[in-house]
Amino acid sequence: MYCVLGTTYYNMPKNWQVAPVAPTEIKAKFPELSPVVLQLLYNRGLDSQEKVDEFLNPDYEQDLHDPFLFKDMKKAVKRIMAAVKKGEKILVHGDYDADGVSSSAVMTSVLQKLIEKFRPEEAIHELPLQIYIPHREKEGYGLNVEAVKGFIKDKINLIITVDCGIANAAEINLCNQAGIDVIVTDHHSQPLELPQSFALIDPKVEKEKYPFRELAGAGVAFKVAQALIKEAKKLDDQENWEGLEKWLLDLVAIGTVADCSPLLGENRTLVKYGLVVLNKTPRLGLQALFLKAAIGGNNRINGGLKDYLPTKAGWLNTYSIAFQISPRLNAAGRLGHANTAYRLLITTDRSEAEDMADLLNQTNSQRQVLTDRLTEEVRQKVETSLKTEKLLFALGKDWPLGVIGLVAGKIMDQYNRPVIVASENDGEIVGSGRSLPAFNVIEALQQLDYLFANYGGHPAACGFTLKDKNDLAKFKKEIQQSANKNLVDKDLTKALLVEAVVDLEEVTWSLYDSLNNMEPFGDSNPRPKFLVQSVEVEALEPVGKDNLHLRLLVKQKNGLLRKFIGFGIMPEHNNKIKKGDRVDIVFDVGVNEWNGNRELQLKVIDLEKKDE
């Protein structure tokens, strides 16, 4: 969708790439839209009235697909309802990341309600519903044989996986042999061998007909919940099933944003309404987390959870989830056990909520320190291979498995290359990878399937365990050769994606309001960046503590003046730009509020002095 705007920009610190201008025929379709807004919609592939309406005005009732469009949904619902009515033992098997624990909470919440309503009285003394989330370091991702043996011993009748299971053919076969039915709900890419589960609900399976393929694990779990609620309405139309469904949306929003799922189509609708729920969530654990971590403006810690008030409307957004909520939920599984995060999401006890929030806050702080230290260690290891390899590889001894994926992501962000970080722990090689769109890392792993005890993931992220640590050298050689071949002609200069070239008079409060209507921002719907060209510097001054920031006043050729602020860019541009210079500026549009005043804030992302 993006192309390079001329060759001039290749000499810049970043490769500025500007979206191609929307064609005339598209503009003719939407005469009521401003050229800038139309360009933003076109960049997102929204080229029909139906797509534009769904994007700008998501409708919960109209835009969500029927969950029974999943080919196995009817079969799954029938089996689950039978298990509930017979009083069978049901186990939800989750995952240890933020999407996994959110998915688990979605599934157990709806199952618990069904059990309360429809389970026979004679079976009420038994434990009807269990949750199992594996330990990241001790058990790894997905089902494992030892855990399955425990499920068999406990006489579990039905297992429902969430955010996992698609890559567990062997473990599910073991369940089948023991008479345990398994319903897989997942969203990861199809492996070479599909599990022979009772039902399989995964939008990425090749033969699946569900019309939206990009649901997160929490989104898939929610579609199962929707289907179960539809069935429950037939049995009891007096219950507020619609309320149960919509109060799950805060969990769906957390899981979807945390998993970096595209915020277009059905995901956009789920997250938009999920943020409404999140801003007034009744979940005591989330309320406690908001207070303890001052998330969404909630810094009234001294008042305690009993004095919690819903956040100011709109304060919790996708940024809150991505950078404040999900890191704390993820921290539990990275350095301890994800049960802590799960308990936080489902607890109804105030004291437990505050304890869990405190623990997650402390664990996240530890995670930050550990990640920073390990990132520096990995950076030193990979720098020697920058000139020879397209894929960067680092191996350590006893590195914490819970943070190696984070470290891989940080190294990829710095060097803009695929990265694999692996660790040898107790004689076993476990690795995590992050990749660029130009290199599908899960396909690369599938080509080396014979080397792994287990593996899985997405085109942009993967995890694996080698069968034999002695195969490490072979794996490293093969994966780097694959990356070198795929990326041989690719420019790996980090791209700065620009949505549109604008004139300063187009940057108005009306544009700001239009950008607000494009929320929630996230993957595939990034906050727009604009480019203004050849503006003259009228004034500039360093500002802020240690003079790290740069304030600019620039003038367009028609005489229009505008202020810009560049946070943290003063060291880079000190003594390079002066009054009278002409510059190109990439920026985004926000608002600055102080003492009751309100003005548009144009924040510099990057700038370059024009040649004389």
Image (tube, rainbow, N blue to C red):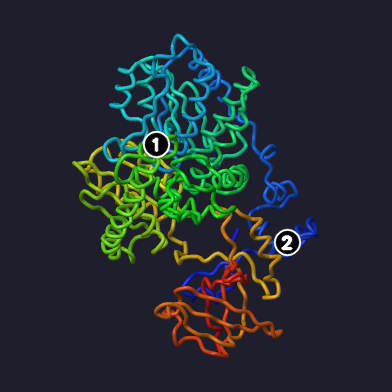
Q: Image quadrant of residue 418?
A: bottom left
Q: In the image, 480: left or right of 42?
A: left
Callout 1: few (<14), some (14-19), or many (20+) C-alpha neighbours within 10 Å? some
Total labels drawn: 2
Q: Quadrant of the N terminus?
A: bottom right
Label 1, secondary structure: give it.
helix
* Residue type beneath disc 1: Arg
Looking at the picture, tell me which residue is in the foreground, 123 or 572: 123
Q: Residue at x 32, y 39 (%)?
A: 337
Q: Is residue 353 above or below residue 11?
A: above
- Residue type, mark 2 in image: Pro
Local crowd at mark 2 within 10 Å, few (<14), some, or many (≥20)?
few
Place residue 232 in its image quadrant.
top right
Q: Position of residue 479 (x, y in %)?
A: 35, 50
User: Dot 1 corresponds to which residue?
Assistant: 343
Quickly name the residue at label 2.
23
In three-dimensional space, the C-alpha distance between marks 1 and 2, rounded to whole angstroms, equals 51 Å
Residue 341 at what x, y percent from top left? 39, 41
Residue at coordinates 44% horizontally, 55% vertically from top-left? 294
Work out whether mark 1 precedes mark 2 in sequence or the reverse, and give the earlier one.
2
Q: Residue furthest left?
A: 426
Identify the disc placed on residue 273: none
The residue under the point 45% across, 50% down is: 290
Q: In this orientation, which residue lies closer to the viewer: 462 or 246?
A: 246
* Helix, strand or loop status at disc 2: loop
Q: Position of residue 265 (x, y in %)?
A: 63, 45
Q: Nearer the viewer, mark 1 or mark 2?
A: 1
What residue sits 22% from the left and 46% below the top? Answer: 424
Q: Is residue 129 above or below residue 142?
A: above
Image quadrant where one finds the C terminus: bottom right
Q: Is 171 above or below relative to 583? A: above
